[in-house]
Image: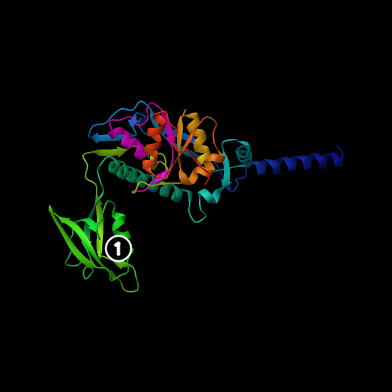
Amino acid sequence: MRRRGVTVILGALITALLAAGVMVAPLPYVVLKPGPTVNTLGSEQGTEVIQVKKGDTSTSTGELRLTTVNVQSHVELVWAIQGWLSGSDAVVPRELIYPPDQSEKQVQEQNAQEWKQSQTSAETVALRELGYPVLTYVLKVTDGGAADGKLQAGDRITSVDGTTIERPSQVTDLVRAKPAGTTMAVGYLRGDKAGSTEITTKATDGDDTPRLGIEIETKQPNPFDIEIDLDKIGGPSAGLMFSLGIIDKLKPEDLTGGKVIAGTGTIDDDGNVGPIGGIPQKLVGAEKAGADLFLVPKDNCAEALRSAVPGLPMAEVATVDDALAALTSFTAGGTPKPCTAS
C-alpha cells in the first residue's frame, strides 16, 4: 500500500476515534425529562399514598395527580443532541440542578428534606381548611425580656393589639410593624382562663428589632393520624397536590367530580402556592396521564403558556383556596381562572 493511502486510513481512523471519544465524553449539562405522575388519592406499589389511620375518609371518583421531572445527570453528546431535538425534554447547564459547591448526594439529601417539609406544610394547610386552626403557644419566656413576668410557658397567644392570631407568623409581623419601645396589648389563654397583658417591646443589644422576648411553638389539635407514604420523589413541588389530596380524603364531598386533575407547586404553612421548575416536562407528563386540568402556580404561568399542551386547560393558582375554587368551578362545568402571562 502506498504511503499516502496508509496516511489517509490512519487519519480517518484517528478522526473516528476522536469523534467516538467526543460522543461519550460527559458534558456539563443535564437533561430534564417528563417524570411519572402519582395519584395522591390512590396507591403506589400497593400502599396508599395518603394514609388516614384515625378518622373517617371518603372515596373520590377522580384523581389528584402530582407531577414530576426526571433528571438525567450523566449526559453524553448523543443524549444532549436527542434532548435538544426533543419536543418534551430540556437540556440545561448542570449547575442549575447541581450547584458547584454541592455534590449530587448533598442535593438529593436537600431534596429529601424539602420533600418531608412539603408534606408537613400540606397537612397543616389541609387541616386548617377543614376547620382545625394552628394555635400559637409560648414555649419559653426569655429572662429579662419584655414578656418576663407577664407571660408564661404554655400560654396560648390569642391576640396582639386587637388582632386575632390565626397564624404564628402574625405575632412576629405585628410586633415588628412598630418600633421597639411600643406597648402592645397581648391576649392569651392560660389553661381555660382568658387574660390580657400590656408588654413594651424591647430590642436586644446591637439589634433594633423589636421583640416580645418569647419563643413560640405551634399546635394543631385534630382527631386524625395522617401519614404520607411516598419517599422516592424529592423536592417541595408536590406540596399543593398533597394538601388537596388530604382535603379530598377527609371531606365528604368529592373535589374531583370524576375528573383527572394534575398540578404542581410548593406550599407553605400559610397556604401560599410557590413556583417550581420543570413546568414544560410536567405538562407533558400530565397529558400522558390523561389529565383534564392542570393547576399551575401563578408565578409559573408565563412559562406554562409558552409550553402549553393542546387539549390540556390550565388554571392559575396562588393559594390553596384558589386551587379549591378552580376545582369547584371546573367540576361544575365552569371555567377556572386561566393562566395569564403577567
Measured as percent of width and height from the top left, residue 22 is found at 66, 44
Please report the residue visible at 20 percent of the width from the left and 65 percent of the height from the top.
198
Magenta residues (range)? 242-268
Residue 222 placed where, x, y %? Answer: 22, 42
247 shown above or below 162:
above
Q: Nearer the viewer, residue 107 or 139?
A: 139
Instruction: Residue 42 in the image: state x and y as whole percent.
Output: 35, 30
* Residue carrying label 1: 175
**In this orientation, which residue lies closer to the viewer: 181 or 300?**
181
Q: Is residue 154 visible?
A: no
Q: Is residue 22 visible?
A: yes
Query: What residue is drawn where x is 48% and y is 33%?
Result: 286
Q: How many numbered marks have been drawn onto this rendered protein structure?
A: 1
Name the side, left or right, on which 312 lies relative to 214. Answer: right
Q: Amino acid at mark 1?
A: Val
Q: Is residue 339 left or right of residue 130?
A: right
